[in-house]
Image: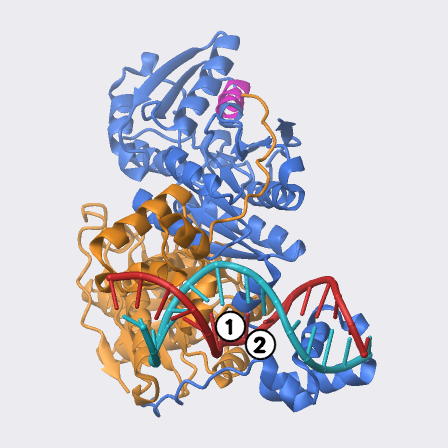
Chain colours: A orange, B blue, C red, D cyan
DNA sequence: CTGAAAGCGCTTACAG
DNA sequence: CTGAAAGCGCTTACAG
């Protein structure tokens, strides 16, 4: 394939005035056929539409927002599009926004707090009707700044603990509890939990759930620390497990993330421990990047799309009701996905997902 | 954590007029301190900035675009954010856009052509300065429509074969060639290529590359068709391979995607064939969802970020040079990532990526 | 049912 | 160095 002709010089887009001229009507009439077609006589409407088509007119939404004083777009700022949970959130939000006649715009802050601020400022400058923010760390400053200026913000996947904006959370304690219950139900009595420090909310909450389940069952829990929460943390943790004498070794391991779980499975295999024969393993997060590991990984699925849908709902309510709106926190429930790494090969992957509980509301 | 207070009623954002009043200057002066600070006396500038801070003023970018007749944002419409290649593209485009003082907005069409059109129309309505489009199928209609109205479009990852817009492509034939050369270099003489029909450009081009390498080497190629290009295609293809008598079985398999390769590895293992001992396997795409499979998968990496960077470069040139701009096609080169599924366990994963060739230009 | 006119929040020559 | 005024492309009462 070869080269190209030069670009047609940037043609100026037709305006409503051009359409009006071509249709032989006034500017206001064109606006009416766009906004209140029922107020316009059929034949006029047709002439205007003909002119619109002929000219390839596309209304300037910036001018429209400015004049109408309303903006039908929502900005979604995400920490990390590399994590499939956030892609799911975006998909859910997208669908719900469309269903409500709004447009969703995405911005990826790529784990960079400064970039996150840039995006927040951008959306505010664009006068979106509201912002959905999935932050990595405490978004206090950013949220404060934006809210103080009057733009509604819904925080996703981070519990800021403050009641001054809506929040959508996953019940991470329940995730940990589900995971441990699963292992206990399989008959395991000595569990291990591989995780980082409680610096990150999800780690802290999942740990709580695991501990509660183990304590309630009168079983035993070994906690194995790791700095690296992705696959790279696998070798270290696997080495520690493999080094234990067989009679003291846990018979089930819960990794705080799927990537970590995947790394574990791989390294345990190399150390000569069969999964799940010698030791059952599961992750948490249902991260698609950990799909199809050596042994398909049992996990706890976070309902990303549900989060996106709920968030748009809360935001739209706040925009519509203004002062009448009351902030609330929606807590969405995770669900267990049983696969081979805990239940064995005969277990059909992906089929046994338990259906999630109803989201709880509070607030 | 409990409930919330009601939202502060949607406060109206301060305008430049408010800033001017507070600073005791005219509207035009405020605009000058924002756009041409050097033209304003230091003390005045300070007063204006004080007013801006006090009021929490954020300039309305819609009004600015309207008045200035320029818009510093670029829209990126992606087929599928679930595929990590596109996330990489977005990251590269983001960085390059920022470096050039523009803002990148993302929209995910989620494999839905209608949604893709919606996004194109939205960006056109928003009067972005240009659009980057990574389509799934031939984007002819959409691109024509948008370009006819004067918005520059750069097409990513799809060869439309027409010289009337800029394009950034990955050299998929080279990807296939690299893959086959790798297997041949390892000493394999009977290769299999598992892929769908040539309906999709990448499949067609990768197949060409594989065939060329095999033919040039005087080796043998078995082509195994599959409908499903993701992990689900693994079992069928693995069954066909396993069913062959050992002396006719290929000693190396190239899957057209990583997900397919991952599915293959898993199923071959279940069928009792060791990877790479009995049969070497590799994928193509370097999809992070296929990370850390049973056996880390050798693959061909597509330089997503490079694509994003190149695309923004072409677009900005077209916007800046207008009629002077000449459309061109940039072809970016893939690179081999050798891992255990072809090279064996002793091979250190992720270390042996060959560095990619320089991108070629044409046009 | 249609049109004339003010106004949304900004930028930008043009005067002073 | 600063201000007054026109204009960007639209919407929306308000008249007719």
Q: Is B292 displayed left or right of A333 in the figure? A: right
* Residue A292 in view in this figure: no
Nearest to the observer: residue A242 or residue B244: B244
User: Residue B132 colored magenta?
Assistant: no
Dominant SS in magenta: helix
Q: Is label 1 in a helix, a strand or a loop?
A: helix
Picture residue at 45% right of the left edge, 86% below the top: B11
Q: Contact, CB < 8 Å: mark 2 with mark 1?
A: yes
Q: Is B307 displayed left or right of A211 in the figure? A: right
Picture residue at 52% right of the left edge, 40% below the top: B154
Q: Which residue is mark 1?
A: A124
Up the image or down, A130 lies above or below A94; here it is below
Q: Are marks 2 and 1 on the same chain?
A: no
Which quarter of the image is occupied by the C terminus of chain B? top right
* Residue B175 drawn at (x, y percent): 51, 27
Up the image or down, B281 lies above or below A335; here it is above
* Residue B270 drawn at (x, y percent): 27, 35
Q: Which residue is mark 2?
A: B58
Magenta region: B176-186
Q: Is label 2 in a helix, a strand or a loop?
A: loop
Tell me which chain the residue with mark 2 is part of. Answer: B
Q: Dot 1: few (<14), some (14–19), or many (≥20) neighbours within 10 Å? A: many
Quadrant position of residue B271: top left
| Count of number-bearing discs | 2
* Residue B361 drawn at (x, y percent): 64, 29
* Residue A41 drawn at (x, y percent): 22, 58
Quadrant position of residue A305: bottom left
Which quarter of the image is occupied by the N terminus of chain B? bottom left
Up the image or down, B146 lies above or below A149; here it is above
Nearest to the observer: residue A68 or residue B267: A68
Nearest to the observer: residue B6 or residue A177: B6
């Amino acid at each position: 394939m070869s080269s190209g002709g030069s670009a047609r010089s940037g043609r100026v887009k037709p305006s409503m005035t051009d359409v009006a001229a071509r249709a032989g009507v006034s500017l206001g009439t064109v606006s009416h056929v766009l906004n209140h077609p029922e107020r316009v006589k059929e034949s006029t409407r047709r002439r205007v539409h003909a002119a619109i088509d002929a000219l390839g007119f596309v209304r300037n939404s910036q001018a429209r927002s400015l004049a109408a004083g309303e903006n039908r777009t929502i900005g979604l700022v995400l920490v990390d599009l590399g994590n499939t949970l956030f892609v799911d959130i975006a998909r859910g939000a997208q669908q719900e926004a469309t269903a409500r006649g709004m447009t969703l715009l995405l911005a990826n802050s790529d784990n960079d707090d400064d970039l996150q601020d840039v995006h927040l400022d951008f959306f505010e400058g664009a006068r979106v009707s509201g912002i959905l923010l999935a932050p990595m760390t405490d978004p206090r400053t950013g949220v404060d700044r934006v809210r103080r200026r009057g733009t509604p913000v819904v925080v996703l996947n981070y519990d800021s603990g403050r009641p001054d904006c809506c929040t959508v959370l996953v019940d991470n304690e329940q995730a940990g509890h589900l995971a441990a219950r699963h292992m206990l139900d399989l008959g395991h009595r000595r569990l291990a939990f591989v995780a980082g420090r409680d610096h990150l909310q999800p780690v802290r909450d999942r740990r709580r759930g695991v501990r509660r389940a183990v304590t309630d069952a009168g079983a035993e829990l070994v906690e194995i620390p790791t700095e690296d929460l992705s696959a790279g943390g696998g070798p270290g943790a696997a080495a520690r497990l493999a080094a234990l004498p067989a009679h003291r070794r846990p018979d089930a391991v819960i990794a705080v993330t799927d990537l970590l779980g995947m790394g574990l499975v791989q390294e345990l295999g190399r150390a000569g421990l069969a999964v799940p024969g010698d030791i059952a393993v599961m992750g948490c997060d249902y991260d698609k990047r950990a799909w199809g590991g050596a042994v398909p990984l049992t996990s706890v699925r976070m309902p990303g799309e549900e989060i996106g849908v709920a968030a748009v709902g809360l935001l739209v309510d706040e925009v519509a009701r203004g002062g009448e709106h009351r902030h609330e926190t929606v807590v969405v429930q995770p669900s267990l996905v049983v696969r081979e790494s805990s239940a064995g090969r005969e277990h059909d992957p992906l089929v046994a997902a338990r259906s999630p509980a109803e989201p709880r509301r509070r607030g």
